[in-house]
Image: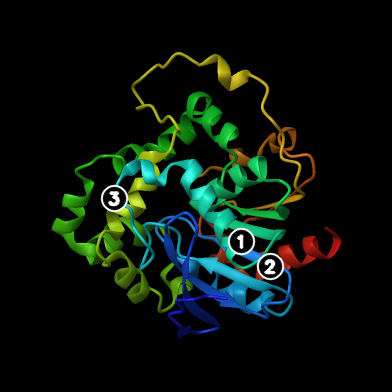
Amino acid sequence: MDPDPRSAEDGQLSVIRVPLSTGIALDVAVAGEPGAPAMICLHGFPESHRTWRHQAAEFARDFHVIAPDQRGYARSDKPEAVEDYAPDKVVADLIALADHFDARRFTLVAHDWGGAVAWMAALKHPDRIERLVILNAPHPLVFQRALFDDPEQRASSQYIRSFRDPGLEARVQAMGVEGFFDRVFAPLIDPAKLGDERARYLDEWSQPGAMTGMLNWYRASRIIVHAMDETPERPAWLDAPFPSVKVPTLVIWGMRDAALRPGQIEGLEAYVDDLTIERIEDAGHFVPWEAPEAVNAAMRRWLARA
């Protein structure tokens, strides 16, 4: 199926190179039988397919698990223009990836920026997505409203303004990727749960153009994040009707997330027709690997009845 495979064993996963019809080539980790139902897993910032190492091991028994390194990350292609990371481009990558694997319909599992792609895909391509699993990734309208109405969430999201600063890469270069890991990323995670993954992060972030590629997701986003001392006028469209997600959806939320507050799951039922929420009290933002047993159990329960 893949005319240009670049295979490497990655624990439970085999990593291949996949050229997409969007003109982008991605590194894609796969596990399970190709003939099984497809489960596509999308990571977020600042990670890779490794986000799903525990889920791939579990769900490869029943699914063909497909976990790409999204555009801009690790060794996947990194287009230079900010607009190449716009929402329509990254959603198109997802659909092209499914097409490459002949997955007409698939279960979509997504975290962080991967979740942003997943929410948009569920709204635009409900015919392709059989079931949706979201992990600590806010619904686009709920998140934007919170950035206007919830001072705590706005404060927690000020890092987005920093990530959009075109001078950030120079500061990261000055401190080095190890310094970025230790000063920016490490304080947000439990080192005991990270295991031996640190070297993988440093390798992925060190790839040419990777830091800019990852940050361009923030720069291309239409999300509005005002400074804390601003008093913006509330746009009327925030309270206009918004289409609901028709795809059966499981939302799993690590309740200790300091960046995306638990308020992001309040009132979500107004925008998802068939919604199940699982709260994991002792996990933070990186819930797929902070609490893998709880995540896998929640997914198993829901998939059994979905």
Q: Kindly give the residue lying farthest to the left in the view shown.
A: 174
Disc nearer the start of the sequence (1/2):
2
Task: Determine whether 60 is above or below 96 in the image.
Answer: below
Q: Which amino acid does label 1 sit on?
A: Ala
Q: Quadrant of the C terminus?
A: bottom right
* 200 and 293: which is toward the camera: 200
Q: Callout 3: 10 Å neighbours few (<14), some, many (20+)?
A: few
Q: Name the residue under label 3.
A: 80
* Residue 104 in picture, x, y percent from top left: 70, 59
Where, by quadrant of the figure, is residue 271 drawn?
A: top right
What SS does tag 3 mark? loop
Residue in the picture at 68% in, 74% down: 59
- Find numbered disc 2 in the image and state the secondary structure of the residue it sits on: strand
Depth check: 4 or 38 in front?
4
Residues at circles 1 and 2 in contact by the CB criterion of under 8 Å: yes
Could you say which disc has been placed on residue 98 in the image? Answer: 1
Please state the horizontal and vertical placement of residue 186, each as a whole percent of the image.
35, 62
| Vertical side of 3 occupied by 270: above or below | above
Pick the quarter of the image with the N terminus: bottom right
